[in-house]
């Protein structure tokens, strides 16, 4: 027994997932339309009067024993203050309601119900592993979900989802592709959850695309407080070839730092290995805390969705932080969650600007995004536009529209670009063995 939470969504859905998502969505809409009093909602009516504030919601887990993203709702509130200090959007104030998702399904559903109750026109820039709990509620109310973190299959299958990045699938596939050229045996340390079970699939897609053997899979309890057994297993698997340096890939979210404590203590007993990981498991703050240039991440390849934090394309986001949240230590401009929230609100503003002085509701925001609106994010992503089914529908990801990733490396303790520009992972993802 693994003690897993069985309500977790998977990163990679089976091929029939889009069909089931459509059936589920249709069922919820029909049920709520016919039982409006019981559901407490009617699709497409949220948004309030045409002169009052425009309400949206941002949620993320805070103060939990696993992954925490307090910077996402904190930045969302800062963004609202900044917008409102500059006249609002089309003359209307932006009101951001926030919710602590707490990394559990009950709280995720509670946040979604709050979004419905508060007439939110969208849920923006949020993080949750519990899509099975919150998406049916949002779908029943017709509320779009803009710019989630990309950690559940529903974010890439629900017709009400508008993801701004390629999620964990793109990051792991890109990392595997890069490590294939530089590594001997590869060990992946990942959460022992239903979602975590799919991470080896995407890493192996990248490895096999370059002719490399598959990674050694090392699952670990999601809320573990020490990883000595997993460290020994990972190091043993990565040092199986005498002529090539192996690589260890920890992808444990906020628990990656705890794993690296065990890793540093044990690595001297094994031949030399390199490390590689993905943003979300490691950022500049983690690198600094682990020793910087003398720490275990020196020389590591790290895949991300966006340019490095020092890139001038982030100046707009940094201006918001500087003007509205300079002393808020929860908001780190290098955090991928904060960056995703900035891009998600860029999408929201583009949709609201397109609507102009017309009715603003969940329905009009959704229709505006569905009508082919192309959104420029200032070069932080390719132009974003969501179609009914996009290029990766064949592997069950019809809403995945941005497959670009960036490759970064830790040099002298700093996370810097290892290669200019983006890497398009479409073909590699299409070849994933799902």
Image (cartoon, grey):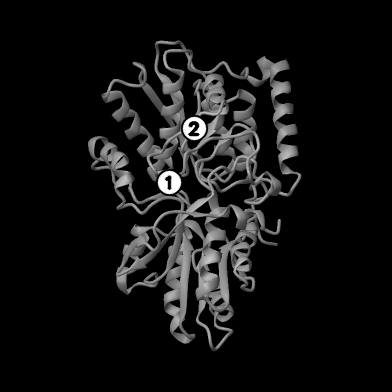
Q: Which mark is residue 374?
A: 2
Residue at x 72% of width, y 33% of height: 22
Sooner in the amino-acid sequence: mark 2 or mark 1 = 1
Report which quarter residue 28 is drawn in: top right
The x and y percentages for residue 293 are: 30, 71
The x and y percentages for residue 80 are: 34, 29
Observer-nearest residue: 261 or 284? 284
The x and y percentages for residue 120 are: 49, 24
Vertical arrangement, residue 248 with respect to residue 9, above or below: below
Q: Quadrant of the C terminus?
A: bottom right
Residue at x 59% of width, y 18% of height: 44
- What is the spatial separation of the Cα atoms under label 2 and label 1, in whole angstroms? 23 Å
Graded by Cα atoms within 10 Å as few (under 14), some (14 to 19) or many (20 or more), the crowding at tag 1 reads many
Disc 1 target residue: 337
Seen in the image, is 8 located left or right of residue 375?
A: right
CB within 8 Å, label 2 to label 1: no
The x and y percentages for residue 299 are: 39, 72
Vertical arrangement, residue 56 with respect to residue 176, above or below: above
Vertical arrangement, residue 176 with respect to residue 382, above or below: below
Is any atom of residue 70 visible in this view? Answer: no
Residue at x 66% of width, y 51% of height: 12
Report which quarter residue 106 is drawn in: top right
Vertical arrangement, residue 5 with respect to residue 348, above or below: below
Graded by Cα atoms within 10 Å as few (under 14), some (14 to 19) or many (20 or more), the crowding at tag 2 reads some
Does dot 1 land on a helix, a strand or a loop?
helix
Does dot 2 land on a helix, a strand or a loop?
loop
């Amino acid at each position: 027994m693994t003690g897993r939470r069985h309500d977790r969504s998977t990163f990679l859905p089976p091929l029939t997932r889009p069909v089931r998502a459509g059936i589920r969505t249709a069922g919820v809409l029909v049920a709520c339309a016919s039982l409006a009093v019981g559901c407490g909602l009617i699709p497409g009516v949220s948004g309030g009067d045409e002169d009052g504030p425009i309400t949206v919601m941002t949620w993320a887990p805070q103060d939990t024993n696993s992954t925490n993203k307090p910077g996402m709702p904190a930045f969302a509130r800062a963004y609202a203050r900044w917008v409102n200090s500059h006249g609002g959007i089309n003359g209307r104030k932006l009101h951001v309601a926030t919710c602590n998702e707490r990394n559990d399904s009950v709280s995720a559903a509670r946040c979604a119900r709050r979004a419905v109750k508060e007439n939110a026109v969208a849920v923006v820039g949020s993080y949750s592993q519990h899509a099975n709990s919150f998406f049916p509620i949002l779908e029943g109310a017709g509320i779009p979900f803009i710019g989630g973190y990309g950690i559940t299959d529903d974010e890439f299958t629900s017709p009400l989802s508008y993801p701004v990045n390629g999620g964990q699938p793109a990051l792991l596939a890109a990392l595997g592709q890069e490590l294939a050229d530089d590594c001997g045996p590869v060990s992946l340390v990942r959460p022992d959850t239903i979602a975590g079970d799919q991470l080896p699939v995407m890493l192996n897609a990248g490895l096999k695309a370059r002719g490399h053997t598959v990674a050694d899979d090392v699952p670990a309890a999601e809320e573990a407080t020490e990883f000595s057994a997993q460290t020994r297993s990972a190091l043993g698997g990565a040092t199986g070839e005498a002529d090539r340096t192996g690589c260890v890939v920890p992808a444990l979210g906020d628990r990656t730092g705890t794993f690296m404590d065990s890793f540093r203590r044990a690595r001297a007993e094994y031949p030399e290995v390199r490390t590689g990981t993905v943003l979300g498991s490691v950022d500049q703050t983690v690198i600094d805390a682990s020793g910087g240039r003398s720490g275990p991440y020196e020389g590591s390849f790290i895949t991300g969705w966006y340019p490095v934090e020092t890139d001038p394309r982030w100046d707009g986001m940094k201006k918001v932080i500087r003007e509205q949240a300079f002393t808020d230590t929860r908001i780190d401009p290098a955090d991928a969650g904060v960056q995703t929230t900035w891009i998600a609100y860029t999408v929201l503003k583009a949709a609201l600007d397109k609507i102009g002085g017309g009715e603003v509701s969940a329905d009009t925001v959704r229709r505006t995004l569905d009508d082919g609106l192309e959104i420029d994010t200032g070069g932080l992503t390719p132009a974003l536009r969501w179609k009914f089914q996009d290029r990766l529908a064949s592997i069950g990801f019809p809403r995945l529209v941005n497959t670009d990733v960036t490759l970064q490396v830790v040099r002298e303790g700093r996370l810097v670009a290892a290669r200019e520009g983006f890497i398009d992972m479409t073909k590699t993802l299409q070849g994933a063995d799902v």
